[in-house]
Image (cartoon, rainbow, N blue to C red):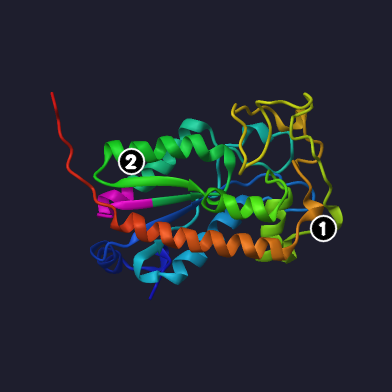
Amino acid sequence: MKVLYAEHTWPEIREAVKEGRVPLIPVGSIEDHGPHLPLETDIFIASEICRRAAERIPEEVVLMPGISYGFNEHHMDFPGNISVEPYHFIDYVFDVCRSLSRHGFRRIIMVNGHGSNTPFLDIAARRVNNETDSICVAVNWWSLARDVIRRVVSHASHAGELETSVMLYLKPEAVDMSKAEADLNIYMGQGKSKFIWRDLVNPSPVSFMEWWSRFSKMGVIGDPTKATAEKGRVIVEETVSRLVEFIREWRRRKIFSRVDHH
């Protein structure tokens, strides 16, 4: 059975709608990930996790082409970044989802691989829920298995032990560990804080983002030298399993009629 949306013909998409299959949209970025990881890291990881999940349950999913570009203006001091303005990004993602809704897909999932996309994907998903007949949700892939990630790695942030381990497992030929270098400045040069730090699975109570070049010399937060392919394998396999579980739950989710109480 075909799983890639773009490989279907239009009559096959019509059948996929009738079958209640869930569009799965990977979203990421093209941005610096230190001197040891490629610019594609965020979109590659999100796409690969989605692909592996979709291949387990092809009869329940259609895998969309990934949305490779996201919001990362704060990384622009490092060469290579491609940043999309917030409202452009929201509108673009919404238009993709609205098109799916117009074809009849009623349950849409976006899987995000870039932390700074998070608030904008939430808004795009809310617009789908408010402005179409479909329901939509956005999830960061690392949120699906936080307990496992906490157990496997000591710290989870940009281009550090987490992402490097995952890339060593998924695409080792793209990782140059000879250039991996630790940058443990998780408090952004301000000294230890009770309120602001950088950790994807242990987020700080206060959310704050500024220019990365102010606190990171190499575009890294954490210690990629601790990364291993085995850590990446454990994390990816559990994340994929939980994504499959969520897809099945989302596919069963009822969409109730609205009630206007005016």
Task: Tell me the SS state at disc 1.
Answer: helix
| Residue 104 inside the magenta-drawn segment | yes
Query: In the image, what residue occupies the spot 65% across and 50% down?
Result: 150
Mark 1, other Cα within 10 Å: few <14 / some 14–19 / many ≥20 = some
Where's residue 109, x and y in %?
40, 51
Residue 15 relative to residue 119: left or right: left
Above or below — where is 200 with respect to 175?
above
Residue 72 relative to residue 177: left or right: left
Q: Quadrant of residue 173?
A: bottom right
Which residue position is annotated with label 1?
A: 177
Residue 166 relative to residue 126: left or right: right
Task: Tell me the SS state at disc 2.
Answer: helix
Which residue position is annotated with label 2?
A: 128
Asked whether the beta carbons under mark 2 and mark 1 sit within 8 Å of each other, the answer is no
Query: Which amino acid type is marked by label 1?
Result: Met
Above or below — where is 192 with respect to 165?
above
Where's residue 49, x and y in %?
54, 60
Where's residue 40, x and y in %?
64, 53
| Boundaries of the magenta span | 99-108
Residue 40 shows in the view = no
123 and 31: which is toward the camera:
123
Residue 197 shows in the view = yes
Query: In the image, what residue occupies the spot 64% across and 29% down?
Result: 209
